[in-house]
Amino acid sequence: MPDQQPTHPPVPLTLEGSSVLHQFFRFDWKAWRAASAADRERVAAEFVAVLKNLERKSVDEGMRMDQGVQDWPVRTALYSQLGHKGDLMLIHFRDSLEELNRVELALARTPLYDFLELRHSYVSVVELGLYESSRKTYEAATAKGFEAFSTEWNAEIASSLARASEAMKPRLFPSVPEAKYLCFYPMDRKRGEQVNWYTVPFAERQRMMHEHGMIGRRYAEHVKQIISGSIGMDDWEWGVDLFADDPVVFKKLIYEMRFDEVSAVYALFGQFFIGVRLPVEKLGGWLGGKLSGV
């Protein structure tokens, strides 16, 4: 079906929020066992102290400063990773790439970092795609007589995005959900010779993304999803974080989405990483081989 508005930009509008860093570590258990008990206790305590500070580091603008720390949003979370790809996972939400870089440096300066091997990482920014409203926004600007990409057009689009960003602020700058399990994976849209997402008319992409989104909404009660864009930042185009208290729901949701047109025809998936939430204060027990309370 041809796009009814070929003069409109083919790119959907997006809203951006928190900068995101995922870190995946292998732990050097042999070196850890070789260290003295006193050194292990000291190193673990220092790392826990740093993580506790990072966990709720940023305070949202307008938050009452007399609130207890436990009420601040969780910006860094730790997970015990399953499988051969690593042992520990960290996810960080911050307001800028510079803040993420400071988080990296703070962790790298701890003694425990000598026992960690960074096996993988992922950099992205929380993104809300506006396929549903982009066309309306473009049409509204056109209806006012603004030529695409003119100064007036750009101002109209910027104003619309500013209003949407304010309305969507909780989703753009999320706290890490308290769910027990995390599933993370990167993905692309195909750009091959046979099928190419980026040559499909806007209206068709809008239709497919709407149908795709309806599947996710059916699982909203059980899964918290955070999508982050990574084009120009990392090797894939998007990163997907799924948070749930039942890990089987990851399989059910992703499997059902595979039958959806946008995934079945146009999606490419990277490696999947899964972990169990590890409260920072329980890290010492984890280092001793105990999963109690995890």
Image (cartoon, grey):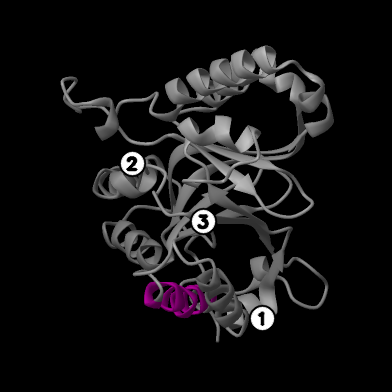
Q: Which mark is residue 181?
A: 3
Q: Position of residue 129 (x, y in %)?
A: 45, 58
Q: Nearer the viewer, residue 11 or 113?
A: 113
**Is the residue 90 above or below the residue 257 in the image?**
above
Residue 212, magenta (yes or no): yes
Span of residues in magenta: 205-218
Residue occupying image coordinates x 70% and y 43%: 87
Q: Secondary structure at mark 1?
A: helix
Q: Nearer the viewer, mark 3 or mark 2?
A: 3
User: Residue 155: which disc?
Assistant: 2
Residue 156 seen from this side: no
Q: Position of residue 16 (x, y in %)?
A: 44, 43
Query: Is there a contact, CB below 8 Å, between mark 3 and mark 2?
Result: no
| Amino acid type for the residue under numbered disc 1 | Ala
Residue at screen point 34% across, 52% down:
146
Q: Is residue 223 magenta?
A: no
The percent position of residue 136, horizontal first and vertical second, equals 33, 66
Within 10 angstroms of label 3, few (less than 14), some, or many (20 or more) residues? many
| Residue at the extreme front | 37
In the picture, the disc for residue 264 is 1
